[in-house]
Every structure is written in structure tokens, then in C-alpha cells.
Amino acid sequence: MTDTPHRAILLLHGPNLNLLGQRQPQIYGTTTLDEINERVITRAQASGVQVIALQSNHEGQLIDWIQQYGPEIDGILINAGAYTHTSIALRDAISGLNKPVIEVHLSNIHAREPFRHHSMIAPVCVGQVAGFGWRSYLLALDGLLGHLGLLES
Ligand code: CA2
């Protein structure tokens, strides 16, 4: 009997995303972070993949988690919130990891204020999904699982 390798991904949420569903529903929708996590976990489970879901308002904490969990996981889905547009440190943590990372956004950052159009982390990610509300996360999960060869072609 051959053992199936254990697969796991990290689902990282950055600053203020803990408030999802409570404020600015016209931009970010009414779905809460817990509900998004549940939907991603359920979909990933169907492919035999475990999800470690974490949120922090602190840049250094996000970087610590990337360093801490990085060696054990197969890839990352990250909505870095506003750090997307500012954080060279986060970009360095991602590029130092050598694992596939997908950037996720609820809103279409390219259709918003000019300061949101640029992503510091996009060049070190496999791809970016933006503008589909909570469904952005499921689309990004599909992208990551496909990239890892865990989806049927
Ligand atoms: O569209 C996205 O997912 C963003 O990453 C969300 C960030 C924003 O800074 C990025 O430009 C785009 C902001 C998240 C703030 O989330 C809130 C949720 C509810 C109430 C207030 C803020």
C-alpha cells in the first residue's frame, strides 16, 4: 500500500480583513472571514489538502508565519490587504520561500484608487486574482491546486 503524501496550504489574511462582513459591504461584501475560511477549507478538503488559515494586522507576524510554516506547506494563498501595496519585506519573505504563492483580493484593485494599482508582491507570485469578492479565494485556490497538479486536467 502506498501512502498519499500529506498536502497543506497556508491561507494568509492581512490587516483589517478580520472586519469583513461588518463594514464597507459595498466594497468587500457581507461574507465574514470565518465564512471565507470555511469555504476554502471545504473546497481544499475535496482535493485532500489541509488549510492553515491565519489573519494578522501586523506585517512582521505575516512574515513570521511565512517563515514558520513555509517549509511544511505546498503553497500559499495571500490577501495581504494594504501591505500588498507597500511591503518590500513581505515580497522578500515570499521570494525567499521558493513555493508557489497566489495573491488574492476581494476588490478589483486596478479599478480603484491609483495607489492600489501597484502590488509589491505580484512579481514574486504565480498569479493574482482580484475583483470577485469571496469567490476570488476559491478561484485562487483552484489556481494553486492546478499549479500543484492536484486538479484533474
Ligand atoms: O480587495 C482586497 O482584498 C484588498 O486587499 C483589501 C484591503 C485593501 O487595502 C487592498 O487595497 C485591497 C483592505 C481590507 C480592509 O478590509 C476591511 C473590511 C471590512 C471593513 C473595513 C476594512
Image (tube, rainbow, N blue to C red):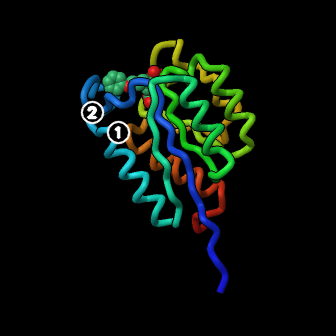
Q: Residue at x 52, y 18 (%)?
A: 116
Asked whether the beta carbons under mark 1 and mark 2 sit within 8 Å of each other, the answer is yes
In this view of the protein, which residue sits in the foreground, 75 or 28?
75
Residue at label 2?
21
Q: Does the numbered disc 2 mark a residue whose Cβ is under 8 Å from ligand 1?
A: yes
Q: Where is mark 1, residue-wise?
A: 33
User: Would residue 91 be visible to someone looking at this image?
Assistant: yes
> Residue 49: horizontal and vertical position, in percent?
53, 61
- Residue placed most toward the observer, 62 or 47: 62
Q: Nearer the viewer, residue 113 or 59?
A: 59
**Residue 15: x %, y % from top left:** 44, 24
x%, y% of residue 131?
Answer: 44, 34
Mark 1 element type: helix
Looking at the rendered structure, the kind of residue marked 1 is Leu
Q: Which of 85 and 7 is in front in this view?
A: 7
Q: Residue at x 46, y 45 (%)?
A: 53
Secondary structure under tag 2 reads loop
Q: Quadrant of the N terminus?
A: bottom right
Tell me, yes or no, if residue 130 can be seen here: no
